[in-house]
Image (cartoon, helix red, strand yellow):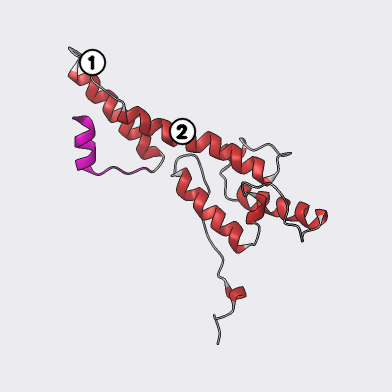
Amino acid sequence: MVGDKINDVKPIIIEKFDGKVNFTLWQRKIKNVLIQQDLQHAILEVEKKPTETTDAQWKRMDVKAKSSIELHLADNVMLNADEDMNAKETWDKLEKVYRGKTLFLKDELLNLRMEKGGNLQDHLSRFQNCVANILKVDVKYEDDDKALLLL
């Protein structure tokens, strides 16, 4: 029956990561792309080639994995990945730069406090700025959640 074969996988289209969308979701999608291509070993925590893989096969897997990652990056983000990095180094560098940014923005919002006797308008402005920055990285907060954070 047509479509039952594992090799009949349709092409996967994933938006290029531009630093503005949610990095964690983009990273999960790319990891799944690498799994579909059987290249996930190149980015795993254990940076060892599988025992049945030759050095030449491992090098080819690494180059293909890095290529798959870079093809899903906008130009401004690709500048963070040096050309001489392997797939794992590229993966880790992107994670360090962009996952940290998302966590920092959330932390900034969660720790925002109005100082006693402070100006309410200044506090609201800082709050709205934090929310706007988080929206740029595609983290969504419901109005109810934003109201609770503001209080």
Magenta highlight range: 139-151
Prevailing secondary structure of the magenta residues: helix
Q: Is residue 91 left or right of residue 53?
A: left
Disc 2 crowd rating (10 Å Cα; few below 14, some 14-19, many 20+) is: some
**From where the camera sits, is residue 6 visible?**
yes
* Above or below: residue 96 compared with residue 33: above
Secondary structure under the numbered disc 2 in the rendered image? helix
Rendered location of residue 23, percent (x, y): 48, 44
Task: Name the residue located 21 percent from the left edge and 30 percent from the top edge.
Answer: 150
User: What residue sits right under mark 2 in the picture?
Assistant: 101
Which quadrant would residue 140 be assigned to in this image? top left
Q: Is residue 144 magenta?
A: yes
Q: Earlier in the sequence, mark 2 or mark 1?
A: 2
Rendered location of residue 113, percent (x, y): 26, 22
Rendered location of residue 132, percent (x, y): 33, 34
Task: Name the residue located 23 percent from the left edge and 19 percent from the top edge.
Answer: 114
User: What residue sits right under mark 1 in the picture?
Assistant: 115
**Which residue of the protein is positioned furthest toward the front in this rendering?**
51
Q: Nearer the viewer, residue 121 or 96?
A: 96
Q: Is residue 21 left or right of residue 97?
A: left
Q: Is residue 51 magenta?
A: no
Q: Is residue 7 left or right of residue 113?
A: right
